[in-house]
Amino acid sequence: MSDSALYLTDAYLREFDSRVVRSSPGEVVLESTAFYPQGGGQPFDQGSLLYGDGRRFNVEAVEKSEGGIVHRGSGEAPGPGSQVRGVLDWSRRYAHMRYHTCLHILSGVVFRNFGSVITGGQIYQDRARMDLSLPDLSRERMEEVLLEMNRVVEEDHPIHVRFLSRAEAERDPTLVRVARELLPNLETIRLIDIEGFDVQADGGTHVRSTREVGRVTLQKFENKGSKNKRLYLTVEPAAPSSSGSGS
Ligand SMILES: [Zn+2]
């Protein structure tokens, strides 16, 4: 099934061709897709499936199910065997990629500095929230964290996707810092490697270098019980992309 999930190996794929495996009113399953299904705090992608003579199925939600990745939406669904061109709402997805990577930087910094563990998070197009275990987080400490995050952004670390067997990954506990239940139960572990800074297991989409995240600002932080903190971050608006899709 991971072969069909094109976003796992190429997060910058914003258009792709595929074929319909199954469809019903409002639902389409493709042989392969670049649409990210909801998961790991990252929202699903939106966009369209173009087919036939200018017909269009609007993808409004995407989710993983037993039978594959399901594209839900409106418009006449293309029938099984149809060739389709998938087109992502790129500004939505790219914002998610930047915020997702921003959370990796945050989690790397708080782990290094305080041994904090991430307990949850949510990505939006204009902000991200992260919950972590950290008993005494003062305003000064938070400023320090932010300074370090922006240093990592400035250092422009390349970001790679790597795959490891689960057995190999479990031998290295530093790879799996997210709470256990957040990790998918898969044979192969996908790693997001921020070169020279941090490696984490996860299934989302990320930008290819830390500078693409942009300058990070802390909106607020609040206590969630005595041990946990909730942080809200924003990044500066994306600069017009000169690197494009890389093709
Ligand atoms: Zn991630």
Image (cartoon, grey):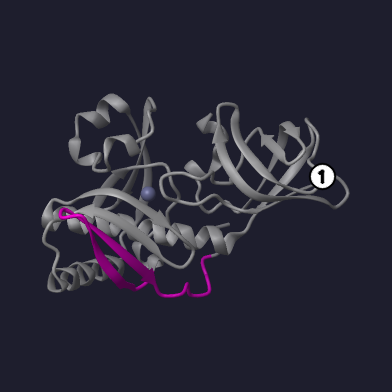
Is 145 placed left or right of 181 in the picture?
A: left
Q: Tell me which segment is drawn in magenta.
A: 214-243
Q: Say which amino acid is labelled 1.
A: Glu
Residue 214 picture location, percent across and down:
38, 71
Is 197 placed left or right of 137 in the picture?
A: right
Nearer to me, 68 or 196 = 68
Give SS at disc 1: loop
Q: Residue at x 34, y 73 (%)?
A: 215
Q: Residue at x 52, y 71 (%)?
A: 242
Nearer to me, 222 or 2 = 222
In the depicted structure, whether residue 216 falls above or below residue 94: below
The residue that mark 1 highlights is: 76
In the depicted structure, whether residue 67 falls above or below residue 149: above
Residue 178 picture location, percent across and down:
27, 43
Q: Is residue 197 visible?
A: no
Residue, far right: 53
Q: Quadrant of residue 212?
A: bottom left
Q: Residue at x 12, y 58 (%)?
A: 113
Q: Residue at x 62, y 53 (%)?
A: 46
Q: Quadrant of the C terminus?
A: bottom right
Instruction: Look at the numbered disc 1 and say if its residue's Cβ is closer than 8 Å to ligand 1.
Output: no
Is 90 placed left or right of 191 in the picture?
A: right
Q: Quadrant of residue 3?
A: top right
